[in-house]
Image (tube, rainbow, N blue to C red):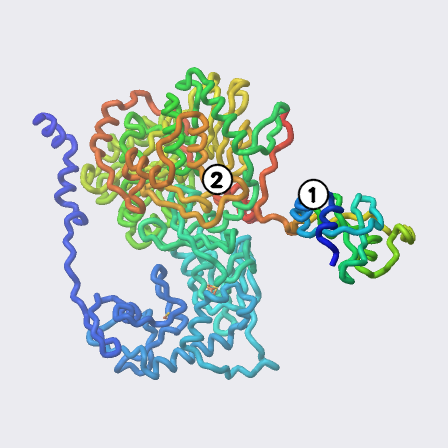
Amino acid sequence: MFSWWRTMQESGGLWNSIKIIYRRSDLRVGTLVGEDANGNKYYENLRYQFGRHRFVDYKLKEFDASQVPPEWHGWLHYMTDNPPTKVPPVPRKFHAEHQANWTGTTKDYVPYSTTRPRIQSWIPPTNKQ
Amino acid sequence: MLARALLRRVFLPRYNRSLSQSPRLLQVQEAPKLLSVWIDDKMVQVEPGTTVLQACAVAGVEIPRYCYHERLSVAGNCRMCLVEVEKSAKPIASCAMPVMEGMKVHPHSDISKRAREGVMEFLLVNHPLDCPICDQGGECDLQDQSMAFGSDRSRFVDNAFGGKRAVEDKEVGPLIKTIMTRCIHCTRCIRFAGEIAGVQDLGTTGRGGDMQVGTYVEKMFKSELSGNVIDLCPVGALTAKPYAFTYRSWELRRTESIDVLDGVGSNIVVNTRGEHVMRILPRLNESVNEEWISDKTRFAFDGLFAQRLTVPLARDATGQLRSCSWEDVLSRVSGKLVSIQNPANEVVGVAGALADCESMVCLKDLFNKLGSESLYSETPVHIGSCGNDLRSGYILRAGISALEEADLILLVGTNPRYEATLINARIRKGYIHNECEIAVIGPYMDLSYQHEHLGDDPAVFSGMIRGTHPFGKKFSRAAKPVIIVGEGVLARDDGAYINNQIYMLSRLSPVHGSDWKIVNYLHTTASQVGSMDIGYNTADLPDLSSTRLLYLLSADSVDVTRDQLPTDCLVVYQGHHGDKGAHIADVILPGAAYTEKEATYVNTEGRAQVTQAAVKPPGEARDDWSIIRALSEYAGHTLAYDNIDELRERMAEISPTLVNIDTKQDSCFHSLCVELLYRTSPKHKPYQTPISVKLNSLADFYMTDPISRASKTMAQCVQAVKQADKN
Ligand code: SF4
Ligand code: FES
């Protein structure tokens, strides 16, 4: 068992630990494996249970799993043991820039009617002068 | 006093003579002897002349029927109403057979049932049975009655050789879709056209299996009442063309409401599906529209989907109307309202044809609070000194249903056929069943019944009064004369003078002063009587050169251009369509149309009726009265009512007639009204201009207000009528 005391100390003291637990309901420490373009940090700690030993510390306060770019996604989900810091992904011309999910933001997708509205509004004539 | 009475006796002896001698007046109706009829061992007593079908109805037995209709003549050609009668060799057609004393009818006997089953089978053999694609499906008499009375299987097997009867569809205009194969030859449509609409366009050709119902040669069914044949047709042979295939009858929700496109206030049912008006049907009201409605009432509702004002609009600095929030427009209007120093002259309100009583009351209360009395109704009414003070001086006093009883009707400056279609249907009913005579003063017109044309010279009245014109004599002999004065007179500058002459003429009648109401006014807009009840000014609009705020409440026919107004005048338009009023407005407050609000309208006979909200107003549009209520709060003159019930209480204070829903209140103080008219009679001669009418052709009839002007169907009708007139 990894000592909770050491975990707390490595996370920056009691107050910081409370803040972190408040934010992500979890407190972990590990070795930094790398950082992606958005500033999310990826850690690994082999002393945790297998399958829970890789984790991410998000940059943004409003975090969301879709903020993990695809190159890190593979490593984080144990599909590969090579983080992009070790084996950079081969650039392809069809790669688009990674975009987090917009749900819940002002940019999210709202379904709209594709039929003509039944009630047509009056369009005021353009400037009479 | 005595001298006057003597003089009258000498000069006008006819009054008294006709009073005491008029046979029609004093005739006493003898109570007819009742006949006893046995319906299924139950005895009922009915008047002689009742048909067996009616007697069965009295006994609570409904006989199936296709061709019989209460308001049409009896045709007796569908044979669905066959019943067994004792001592008769064959079953008889109960709709055409008058009862006889002691008759024994067996509507539930085996013979009756077999007769019905046989008739149903013959009808179905010649019917396409295309119910799944038929608009009548679900409300079809043939469907219902074949379920109830028909056989459970078909013996029709000749599909390969003879096949089904098929009939070519007829093209009868843009409103009625015909699928004539479905026709069961009940001839209801033909009888309706001939008897009620007064258009002899429909008829049958051929006989037996080759019989066809149609217009003989291809032409438009040119009638303002044509849509009613859709309701009358018991099957799906005649259905509505503009909204064909858009609904099934069981999907619709019914809202009972009132039509506002003319002054009659026909009772209607608004059928909606979800948030859409799908169709409008008539609703029975014996005292107003019976069970008919005009084509405008029925088909103009598609105008509610076009040209709508859905967001508040205001002119920006460049003079362009842009959408903005309710707060913006209300504070802009209220800011202008309170900044005006001298509201009495500088704030003017005009109520238009579709304005409801609630909003007119609100607007008047608001203006009065500000200190302005300048509220006008869009159509000026020149009736002389009693103006809008005495109600009996400006409504159709006799009432619409009483027109049936009249024996002489004089129409002055009105063509009721197009200005008040259902009133014309009443007059025609009197003409057919009561031998009513009709005379017209105005341009030549086609009223769908015969009438005497007395020319269009306003001077004709003086001849009648002096007794030199033969019509004066006829008038003074009539037992129940009615004069209907239309907008062609009321809108004239010398309207007061002509009105006075009309009263002089009415004095010639022996029933003058009795309960029979001779002089009646026909208004053509739904708001007119209401606005006069509320106290809107009926004079012409004043000089607007010092107006700083012009409030147009659904006023679209008002004759105002920007040039008449000072440049800093704010024109506010409140209404539901981008019509004429919206084009000159600086601020537009989107209101609700008649299917979208609960509002009171007073029809031309003074009957207050309430529309019901069938759907919500589109977009940000709001109930009209609540807009004015909100505006009053912004302007710091909050009106003292917060909901419609409190507003109705306020309306009751102004005039109890406004909240006395669906009753025709007898107008009192008529003698006072007459007295006022004589005392203040204008001395000038009438002008030479001939008396005109507002609408005098079918093409004019279809588009008269913002809703029907926005309606595609109505536009098609106008096109079709013009085309038909050309051919
Ligand atoms: S069209 Fe309809 S109303 Fe006319 S005769 Fe045929 S079934 Fe009757
Ligand atoms: S209803 Fe009697 S014959 Fe048609």
Residue that badge 2 annotates: B622
Q: Is residue A104 above or below residue B113?
A: above
Q: CA distance from mark 1 to mark 2?
A: 55 Å
- Cβ at disc 1 under 8 Å from ligand 1: no
Whether residue B726 can be seen here: no
Asked whether, in this view, residue B455 is left or right of residue B39, the answer is right
Pick whichever, A88 or B427, lies toward us: A88
| Label placed on residue B270 | none
The chain containing the residue under callout 2 comes to: B
Pick whichever, B720 or B293, lies toward us: B293
Residue B50, located in which quarter of the rendered image?
Answer: bottom left
Asked whether, in this view, residue A50 is left or right of residue B490, the answer is right
Residue that badge 1 annotates: A16
Q: Name the quarter where the N terminus of chain B is drawn.
A: top left
Q: Is residue B468 above or below residue A59?
A: above
The reply to whether discs 1 and 2 touch (Cβ–Cβ < 8 Å) is no
Q: Nearer the viewer, mark 1 or mark 2?
A: 1
Q: Which three-letter amino acid code belongs to the residue tagged 2?
A: Arg
Per the image, label 2 sits on a secondary structure element best described as loop
Residue B173: x percent and y percent?
54, 54
Residue at 31 percent across and 70 percent down: it is B53
Pick whichever, B194 or A46, lies toward us: A46
Q: Which three-letter amino acid code belongs to the residue tagged 1?
A: Asn
